[in-house]
Amino acid sequence: MLGDDDTARAYRPVDRLAWLFLDFNAYFASVEQHDEPALRGRPVIVAPLRSEHTGAIAASYEAKAYGVKRGTKVRDARRLCPGIAVRPARHDRYVEMHKVLMAEVERHLPLGKIYSIDEAAFRLSRSERDRAKAIATARRIKQALAENVGPALRASIGLAPSRLLAKLAAERVKPDGLTALELSDLPGKLADMPLTDIPGVGPGVAARLARAGVHDFVSLWDLQPKRARAIWGSVMGERFWYALHGYEVPEEPTKKSMIGHSRVLSRDYETAAAARIVARALLLKAASRLRHYGLHAGALSLMIRQRPEGRWEGGRRFACSQDSFGFLTALDDLWTDYLRNRGADGADGDGARIGGVTVYLHALARTGEARLAQRDLFSDAAGKEGDCRRARLWRAIDLINADPEAKFRRLGAPLPSATAQSSKPKRYVTLASQTGLDLNYLGAKIAFSRVPEEAEFLY
Ligand SMILES: [Mg+2]
C-alpha cells in the first residue's frame, strides 16, 4: 500500500508534448465513405439494424450539418435530411479498418494504448517532444493516413504532456483538428470545457465537485492534489489531478476493462427465446468471473447478430454491483428493447433468426471504488444492503460450482455420481431456465477481439 507521499512520488512530471492522441471523426460513417466513394462529402448515417425506428450509431459531418447525430432515429434523420444515405453497421469491417489505421500510425510512433475502436494514444520519443517537432509528426501522420489508407478517414489529433490532456486537446477541434496543449497553455485554453466532458468526471464526481464549489475548469485546475483526493473520496482523485497537470500517471497494471462472453448460435438456438437463454447463461458466466476477480460492474452491453444479416447493440448502466439477479434484470430490459426494435419493421419481424450473442460487463471497479460509487448511487440504505446480500449469495454459488466435491465433503454429504463419472466440470447451482444448457455445445466460441466501443477511459 502506497503512503500519501509515495503516491505523489510515483508520478513523473512531463513538461513537454509526450503524447499524441488520435480520435477518428465519425468513425463508422467515415469507414462507409471510405468503402463507397460515392458517399464522400454526403450525409451518411450508420444504423445498427435495417429499421426506421432504430437510432443511428454514427453520423457523418455532412449529416451533422443537418442536425442529425448519433442516436437520431433513422426516420427522423430522413425527415431532417431528405436523401440521406443510411447504411447498416458492419462491425467486422470497422474492426478490420481499425487494425489498418493503427498499423499505419505505428509506422511513425509506438502505440501507448488503445481506448476504443476509434481512439488511441501514441508515445512521442524524447527528441520529438517540442512543439514544432510534435506538430510536424502529427501532420506527417495525417498525411500518411490520407495517402496510404484513404482521405475519408480523418482524425482529430491532440498533443500534450499526459494522455488525459492529449485526449482533451483532441476534443477541441473536430473534424480533422490538430491541437497542442502545453502546461503554459493551461488552464486558459481549456477554460470553457464543461467538467462532464472530461474523462474521469462522471455525474457522481461532478456532483461532489459542485458540492465543493468547483463548477468550471479553472477552479478544477486550481485544486490541490490532496483536496482532489478528498473530493473524490479516494486516491483516484489524486491520480486524476496529476494526469490533469501533465504528470505521467502509471496505469494500474492488471486493470481489466471488461469481462464478456460470446457465442455463435447453432440452428437449435437461433430463435429469440432460445438465444435469450444463451445470453443469460453467458452473462451468469461473466458475472461469476467478475466476482472471482473481486471486481464490480457498473454497465452491461449486449450485441446481437442476426441471420442472414443485421446487428443490434445496446447497453445499460447501473450502480456498481456483483449481483447476477440485477445483471439479469438489465439484460431482460435490453432484450425487450431489441425485440421492440426489430419488431417495428415488417421485414425484421418475427421470422428473424439470431446468429450470435455477445454479452459483456464493463465500467469495472475494485471493491473499494465500488463502495464509493454505491454511496453515490444508492440513496436508500436498503437497496445497498440488498445488493450486498445477493452478491454474497452469488459468491457462495460460485464456490459450490467451482469445487463441488470440497463443498459436499464439508457437508458430509455423499458425492453425486455425476461428479465421479464426468471429468468435465458441471455447474450444480443454476437458474431453472439454464437446466440442460451446456455452454460447451452451443456452437463455436467467438474470439473476443472486438474493440469495445465504450471502453473505459483511464488516465
Ligand atoms: Mg471519434
Image: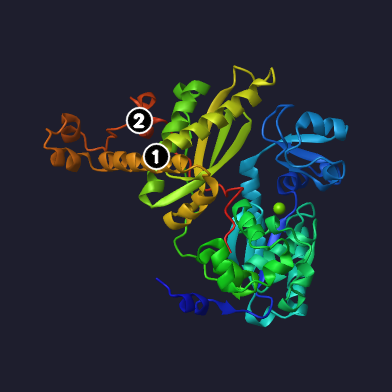
Q: What is the three-letter code of the residue carrying label 2?
A: Asp
Q: Residue 438's mark?
A: 2
Instruction: Identify residue for label 1.
Output: 285
- Crowding near pointer 2: few (<14 within 10 Å), some, many (20+)? few
- Residues 183 and 344: in front is 183
Q: Earlier in the sequence, mark 2 or mark 1?
A: 1
Q: Which of 64/90 is in front? A: 64
Are there few (<14), some (14-19), or many (20+) residues within 10 Å of tag 1?
A: some
Give the residue type at disc 1. Lys
Question: What residue lies at 56% left-to-right and 62% top-to-bottom?
Answer: 232
Q: Position of residue 213 (x, y in %)?
A: 68, 63
Where in the figure is residue 299, as x and y percent of width and height? 54, 44
Q: Residue at x 68, y 19 (%)?
A: 347
Label 1 residue SS: helix
Residue 387 seen in the figure:
yes
**Quadrant location of residue 323?**
top left
**Above/below status of 96 relative to 353:** below
Taking the image as shown, residue 420 lies to the left or right of residue 80, namely left
